[in-house]
Structures are given as C-alpha cells and as structure tokens.
Amino acid sequence: MQTDIDPRTLIGRKALDRNGVKIGTVDEVYLDDATGEPEWAAVRTGLFGRDAFVPLEPSELRDDSLRVPYDKSLVKSAPDFGVGRHLSPEQELQLYHHYGLKVPPPEAESGSAPGELRDAGRLAGDPGERS
C-alpha cells in the first residue's frame, strides 16, 4: 500500500478485485495499533450486503480505486466480524489465513507475546458519521 496516502481518503472509494470487478465501497479503514499504519479496509459489498475485510498490503490505490489482488468471491467469503470496533488478534489471524498471507512477527516494543498479533484499531470517517 502506498504509505503517503492518508487512510481517510480511502473511505468512499470503490474497491475492485484483481480483474477490475467492483467488490464494493471502502466503508472503514483499520490501523495497526503498534505502528498506526493502515492495515485493513472494511468494504461494503452491496446495498444490503455486509462489510468484508481486505488487507491493504499488497493492495494498491490505482485510478481513484482500491485494487485488491484477490477475486471478488474470496473477499465476499471472508469471515464476518462486523465493523465499528477493534479486530482481536484471533480475528486478524483468521483473516491472514483466509487470504493466505504470512502472519507478521510481533512487534518487540508492543509487549505482544510470541506469535500474538497486534490489534487493529479502526479509523472511521468524520466523527459523528455513525451512531
């Protein structure tokens, strides 16, 4: 993910799969608590759909859309954790496995136990957007 992008600018952008098929719209961005870097995006998959989490690395911002290197079907079948709260280390681990990603090593300064994932905090749009 391009690190010079403000994660708040992702909210409301279209999310496209590896073939350019629209998955949905970025609803929220989740930051890594230890680094403050954007780690996950919650993508609203339809008008009456749900939010599916997608990893922001190795996704990229291209042509004003978030391009994820996965098929739409894989994104839509991601575990459903709801939005609006932190992802637990266990939930992050499920997402890493779902997408076939290598689990990152724990940050030495975060106080995490060996093998424990960092918690991903959420970054919503403007305060007051949701109740």
Image: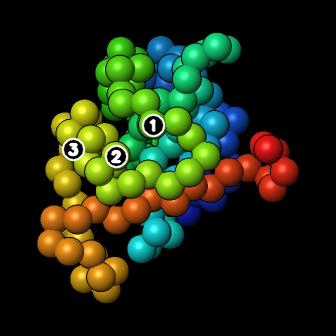
Residue 81 is tagged as 1
Give the residue type at disc 2: Gln
Does the residue at mark 1 contact the one at mark 2 (Cβ under 8 Å)? yes
Tell me residue 77's x, y (percent).
35, 20
Crowd class of label 3 (few under 14; some 14 to 19; many from 20; radius 10 Å): few
Q: Residue at x 29, y 51 (%)?
A: 90
Mark 2, residue position: 91
Please report contact status of discs 3 and 1: CB closer than 8 Å, yes or no.
Answer: no
Q: Quadrant of residue 35?
A: bottom left
Would you call the spot at circle 1 few (<14 residues within 10 Å), some (14-19), or many (20 or more)? some
**Element at badge 3?**
loop
Report whether residue 2 is seen.
Answer: no
Q: Amino acid at mark 3?
A: Leu
- Please give the residue where the numbered disc 3 appears in the rendered image: 101
Viewer-side label of 3, 1:
1
129 displayed left or right of 97? right
